[in-house]
Image (spheres, rainbow, N blue to C red):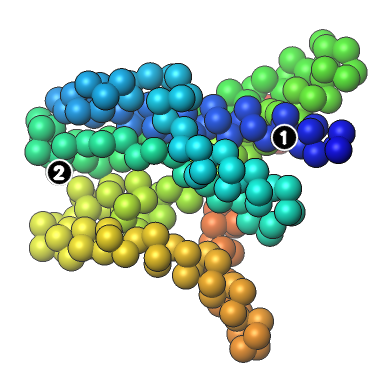
Amino acid sequence: MEKTLYLLTIWALPVIIAITFHEAAHAYAARLLGDDTAARLGRVSLNPLKHIDPFGTVLLPGLLLLTQAPFLFGYAKPVPVDYRALRHPRRDMALVAAAGPAINIVLAVVAALAFHGIDYLPALPAQWLADNLKNALIINVVLAVFNLFPIPPLDGGRILVGLLPPALAVRLARLEPYGFVILIGLFIVLPLVGPQLGLDLGAASQVLSSSVGTVIGWILAVTGHG
């Protein structure tokens, strides 16, 4: 029981902060670029209650963590953006989408830098803080990299829609209603089915894992841990 409670304390705070900042960054960028839809709904805020989805942000990740699932998945309330209200819709759509992953990379860098202050704390608080910072580094990088996959409605897909020529952008945008089904297939169904068929169908998961490891390595090098 004590181990479970400790796990919850070192994962809950990093997850909530990562998701809150991610969604708030989208809302702030949209307001800055001309769309006040999210602002009118109170989403330009660092109050977690404005962004947390009770099931997607709390219950689902908690259950996966407690059952020691091989993957951790969650989501928050999506920030509503009226792209027609943006001053330069195609360009600004890409910027609004990029704001979420960008703030997660900033948070990951802050977590890595904060490691340098741990030695000044007593042993027990130092261990708890170290675990929180390690998880914050991992969660923020995973959230950033995962969201940059070029499949709408992920941020990477929306960035690509904003950058591609209009004809290609329209085709990619049409995938958005099916985006989460595609993602579940790539990251959950195929890796589970592959071994039953004697095949390695976990390419997407391998790309995610490799990319996360590379980005974490860069951050640790830049912040003096290399």
Please rate how many residues cluster around mark 1, counting C-alpha atoms within 10 Å: few if below 14, some from 14 to 19, many from 20: some
User: Compared with residue 43, is residue 59 higher up or lower down, i.e. above or below?
Assistant: below
Q: Position of residue 176 (x, y in %)?
A: 27, 58
Of the residues shown, which amino acid type is indicated by label 2?
Answer: Arg
Amino acid found under the numbered disc labelled 1 = Leu
Q: Is residue 97 visible?
A: yes
Image quadrant for the N terminus? top right
Q: Is residue 200 above or below residue 77?
A: below
Quarter of the view holding residue 103 = top left
Q: Which residue is mark 2?
A: 90
Q: Which residue is mark 1?
A: 8
Measured as percent of width and height from the top left, residue 71 is found at 63, 56
Q: Residue at x 17, y 58 (%)?
A: 169
Q: Is residue 129 left or right of residue 38?
A: right
Q: Residue at x 40, y 67 (%)?
A: 182
Residue 225 in view (yes/no): no
